[in-house]
Image: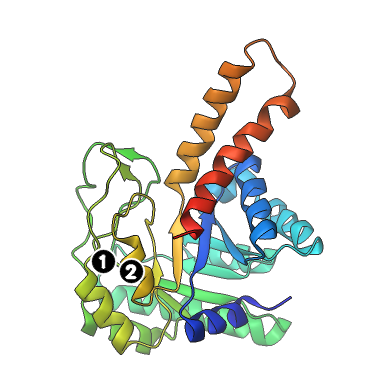
Amino acid sequence: MKSLREILVTAQKNNQIVWHFNVASYEQLEAVARVSQKRNMPFLVGVSEGERTAWGVHRIAHLIQLYRAEGIELFLNADHTHSLEKIQEAVSAGFDEVLFDAGKKNLAENILETKKVVAWVKEYNALHGTDVLVEGELGYIGSSSVLLHELPPDISTQTTLLEAQEFCAQTGVDLYAPALGNIHGILHTGVNPMLNIELLKNLTQNIATPMVLHGGSGTPNLKEAMRLGVRVIHISTELRIAWREGFVSALAQHPQDIVPYHILPEVVSSIEKIIEEKIDL
């Protein structure tokens, strides 16, 4: 099986998307794996610090390895990690990528802390013969994959080209995630703000480091962003909504049934549908 770095190189060369789906339950993970196998597509599986606490860092890493043993191309990302200690925990557990998120800090502090993470991961890779990738974040776009009644009050202004160039050059990250008007979560209207397409175009045309788009759920001009060179797109909130709605629907259809394996397949199917709708873009 190809490495994650090889997958990204191919995506960059062929103007393709590597989809990233966050999972917080077995039903979500199984849905991601089924679509990956059905479509013969590699996917990134993301688990934030909260999701890793729920799963157990080593348990989720082991589950991904079991799927890979079946020939399913899943790669594991330690999403939104805020300390070197948590980065080290994920890398040691066998994750393929880590996102160090110091996006709430000013540019100088962000660069300084991200450089330390990149240096440690590179040293670990050299010692252990691994190839863990490091992603950095520029700007704060909210922190929760939830339904929102208003925009997060403390989201950052959008990244500038000069900031992104300085950040990528000084830190040496393998991927970077800028603020482009995107947000985590979905507004209760079902439609999030438009991405700044001119900024996105400026970044992809002038920076070689692959760009990651966080907050892909509910983004109205996602297809245009894909065409202009985003390499990885994160989807989380829509999978959570599908998980909940799938459960509600399945329980309503089987009001007297208490057998989990009669009910859960319908939940998995509802999540699969959302994943397939995304990749069909």
Question: In the rendered image, is residue 81 in sight?
Answer: no
Q: Amino acid at mark 1?
A: Leu
The N terminus, quarter of image = bottom right
Q: Residues within 10 Å of mark 2 (few under 14, many from 20)?
A: some
Q: Nearer the viewer, residue 213 or 252?
A: 252
172 lies left or right of 107: right
Residue 177: % across, % down:
37, 70
Q: Residues within 10 Å of mark 1 (few under 14, many from 20)?
A: many
Residue drawn 70% across the image and 15% down it: 257
> Which residue is at a point 20% across and 77% down the rendered structure image?
160
Question: Hey, which residue is sitting farthest front in the picture?
Answer: 280
* Percent of width and height locating residue 24: 56, 44
Q: Nearer the viewer, residue 100 or 76?
A: 76
Mark 2 or mark 1, whichever is nearer to me:
2
Query: Label 2 belongs to which residue?
Result: 225
Name the quadrant containing residue 204. Answer: bottom left
Q: Which residue is mark 1?
A: 180
Residue 267, quarter of picture: top right
